[in-house]
Image (spheres, helix red, strand yellow):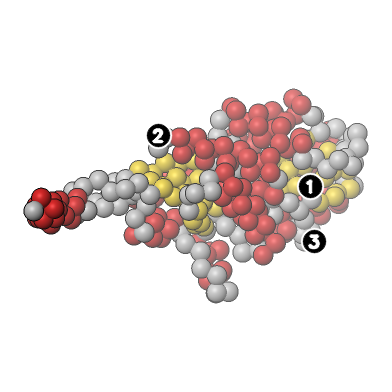
Amino acid sequence: MKKYFVVFCLIFFFLPSMAIAAGHGQPRSVKQGILLVAFGSSFPQAQVSFENIDARVKKQFPDIPVHWAYTSHVIRKKLASQGKHLDSVATALAKMMDQGFTRVAVQSLHTIRGEEFDDLVHTANAFEGMPDGIEKIVIGSPLLSSPQDMEAVTRAIIQNIPAKRKKGEALVLMGHGTPHPSNAFYTALMFSLQRKDPGIFIGTVEGAPGIEDITAMLREKNIKKVYLMPFMSVAGDHARNDLAGEDPDSWKSILEHQGVHCEVVLKGTAEYDNMIDIWVNHLKDAMAQFK
Ligand code: CO
């Protein structure tokens, strides 16, 4: 008789309360996800950078699903025409919201806190706290965001200089550059690098210092041989054309025209583990905000 009473209680009291618990207004179970955000590249050779980052992030956070978004509309469109579909930040977050993620760590794979990063912050913030949506979104900083990053990036660049570089030979890095005030990070980094190694220079394609500033500095120091490297996460369009291209206005052509011998190292910063570690550390800091 007592047994029937227990079953009766289960059916009439306990089970209905379980159904209510899964319904409206109850806390949902935590589901964490990572969204990696890059400008993107349509160069197949540049994919190695993204694969490296993806692998290292998955190794660091083996239980957390990793999603990707590209911020460049032009690149997404180009890839789509080749049958490769990459999400924008908004689409990626909307999908994660539908998939029931309650906490998302968005990691910027940008180099500096420029316009692209500002846009990312705005979009991510807009997705936080929607009804039944993502409860908390945290954002990991770009590569070069703090005085500690300045030291870490300086160290990593110096470690990544080709071993065959001889005394008197310089390293010239090409950053992207921007009209955004954060462009100042490039000159700050050059200052930090030159305190350790006066033969390292950084110019930018779209900001200051430009290649004319760099050629003037090389001339002043009578440098006749340089290693050219992109200071961008991928060795994509800028690296292959503006830095190393055969056109007369590429950095290589301009320097060689002035009698400076150039050797190009076509590797994006995200092809070096010591650089990826800086982004991964930022992601760790962001994830720590969930605790
Ligand atoms: Co560009």
| Residue 270: percent from left, percent from top | 66, 48
Mark 1 / mark 3, whichever is N-terminal: 1
Tag 3–tag 2 contact (CB < 8 Å): no
Q: Which residue is mark 2?
A: 291
Please determine whether, in this image, residue 45 is positioned above or below residue 65: below
Q: Which of pointers 1 and 3 indicates the residue nearer the eye?
A: 1
Q: In the picture provided, is 185 more to the left or to the right than 12? A: right
Please determine whether, in this image, residue 139 is positioned above or below residue 69: above
Q: Which residue is mark 1?
A: 228
The kind of residue tagged 1 is Leu
Q: Which residue is mark 3?
A: 246
In this view, the residue farthest toward the front is 1
Mark 3 and mark 2: Cα distance apart in space: 52 Å
Q: Badge 1 local density, few (<14 within 10 Å), some, or many (20+)?
A: many
Mark 1 and mark 3: Cα distance apart in space: 14 Å
For mark 3, give the secondary structure.
loop
Mark 2 and mark 1: Cα distance apart in space: 43 Å
Please determine whether, in this image, residue 61 is positioned above or below residue 151: below
